[in-house]
Amino acid sequence: MRYRLSRLTGVAAGCLFGAMQLWTDLRQLPARLRRATRYSLQGLAAAWRGQQAVRLELLASLVLVPAACLLGRSGSQRALLLGSWLLVVIVELLNSAIETAVDRISTERHELAGRAKDLAAAAVLVALWLALAVWAVVLLDRGAPTPG
């Protein structure tokens, strides 16, 4: 009996502690979101200042995002067009982060550092191929006769 009571007391205390922690986390959420947004915007600004490829892709977004909204026949097509292009931008940001981290570790040439940068660049290329394929399929579908 004593074991069961102490076990139940421990479970109740754990639930109470969990509820208190959740309440604390929820109260801190707006401040955390503000800080996370600020850090994200600082990252975008740094990418804009320091990475020509990011600048080109963000400028291309000024054309491609409205084009995706106009060219997609359905919500699904618009989502595919937008998503495939945003994936390119996301992968380019990750590529820039990897390059920056590798450069921070050492400025001397090293085979593994070069391989890491090459792999990140390859990921950008694959994302571009995917976007090109998605845009081609959607645009070719626009010209195809509709069944019926």
Image (cartoon, rainbow, N blue to C red):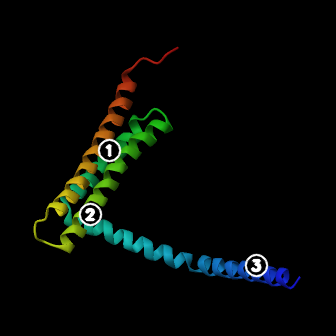
Residue 12 coordinates in the image, percent (x, y): 77, 80
Relative to 106, 43 lies left or right: right
Inspect the image, locate mark 1, and give the three-letter code of the amino acid beneath it.
Leu
Dot 3 crowding, Cα within 10 Å, few <14, some 14–19, many 20+: few
What residue is shown with label 3? Answer: 11
Q: Are marks 2 and 1 in contact (CB under 8 Å)?
A: no
Of badges 2 and 3, the one in the foreground is 3
Residue 92 coordinates in the image, percent (x, y): 28, 55
The residue drawn where x is 10% and y is 70% is 108
Q: Are marks 1 and 3 in contact (CB under 8 Å)?
A: no
Q: Which mark is residue 98?
A: 2
Inspect the image, locate mark 2, and give the three-letter code of the amino acid beneath it.
Ile
Q: Which mark is residue 10?
A: none
Residue 14 coordinates in the image, percent (x, y): 71, 80
Inspect the image, locate mark 3, and give the three-letter code of the amino acid beneath it.
Val
If you read the primary sequence from the N terminus, does the residue marked by circle 2 or circle 3 appear first?
A: 3
If you read the primary sequence from the N terminus, does the residue marked by circle 2 or circle 1 appear first?
A: 1
Of badges 2 and 1, the one in the foreground is 2
